[in-house]
Image (cartoon, grey):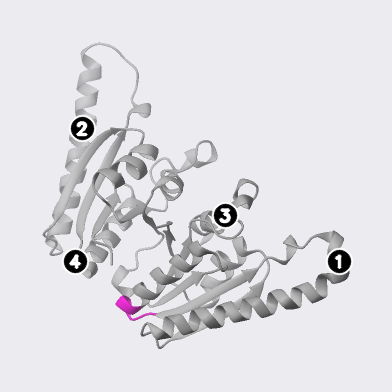
Amino acid sequence: MYKHILVAVDGSEPSDQALMKAIDLAKTYNAALLINHVIDARSFPVMAGPHQQELWGQYNKTAEELLEKSKRKAEAAGLEQVLTVLRNGNPRFEIPEEMTKEYDVDLLIVGESGRNAAERMIIGSITEACMRRSPTDVLTVKNETSATLYRNILVAVDGSEQSEQALATAVKLANIHEATLTIAHVSEWGTFAKDIAFYQQTYAAEVQKDSENMLKKYKEQAEDQGMTNVQTILRSGNPRLEIPRVLTVENDIDLLITAETGQHAVSRFFTGSVAESSVRRSPCDVITVKKE
């Protein structure tokens, strides 16, 4: 599965949870683990003279101690391939765009929010920046549950090529973790145009039938790959709410998998994609699968 895992740490509780999840997954997949911290140069006070150098030295020392402590945790858990990297710059670019490419990362793991969570109202959290900008899959950690205890996986599909890639990832993970797999599609009826109201009932029936056939096909694909505990769910409503807030709770989901964008990617500019809504609203861990 994943062979080069990158986890971003900043000393906060969410990043500690992300680190422990990264360690669990690296052990499960026999993967190399890269632990990274980026000193945000924008938050560094502007001053001149010897005090600036002294303060910068303190920043670096604290960061180095954080990385060393994180590495010891990973090695104590039995990992042998552990590397730490300290960088300076903007973490919203450095982590998802530079680190992932430089170290050939195939899974980036981040906590739900970090020390500067309040900034999301202005410029967006590091977590959301990673989800948008990383070329590789991104796992957003929401809770302390061990990654080895993923037991109920939900994947959201819409028939797009990217959602099928998300399904393929979900099947692989469900097999590895011996988890149940729920394949869900939420039809967004609100997208029907008002000027076709006369034909809406017929059109809705066609959409219903197409959706049922899609889910049947996906279930058969999962079973052909060794899955024995697969269920499908078809709902109507707002997928940005129904998937992360309702279906995860109703089905006791501990890992939600979505594609970066789906059939209605353009709508992200107005109401946000299902992937972004899942990262913000889901109570469980979320993997955003990127286009191959």
Mark 2 closeness class: few <14, some 14–19, many ≥20 residues within 10 Å: some
Residue type, label 3: Ser
Residue sticking out furthest to the bottom = 228
The residue mark sitting in front, 4 or 2, is 4
Q: Distance between the residues labelled 3 and 1?
A: 26 Å
Closest to the observer: 176 or 27?
Answer: 176
Front: mark 2 or 3: 3
Q: Which of marks 4 and 2 is nearer the N terminus?
A: 4
Badge nearest the viewer, 1 or 2: 1
Residue 141 among magenta residues: no
Residue at the top extreme of this rendering: 49
Amino acid type shown at disc 1: Ala
Residue holding disc 4? 30
Identify the residue position indicated by label 1 in the image: 197
Amino acid type, label 4: Asn
Question: Dot 3 corresponds to which residue?
Answer: 273
Q: Contact, CB < 8 Å: mark 2 with mark 3? A: no
Mark 4 vs mark 1: in front: 1
Q: Position of residue 148 (x, y in %)?
A: 29, 72
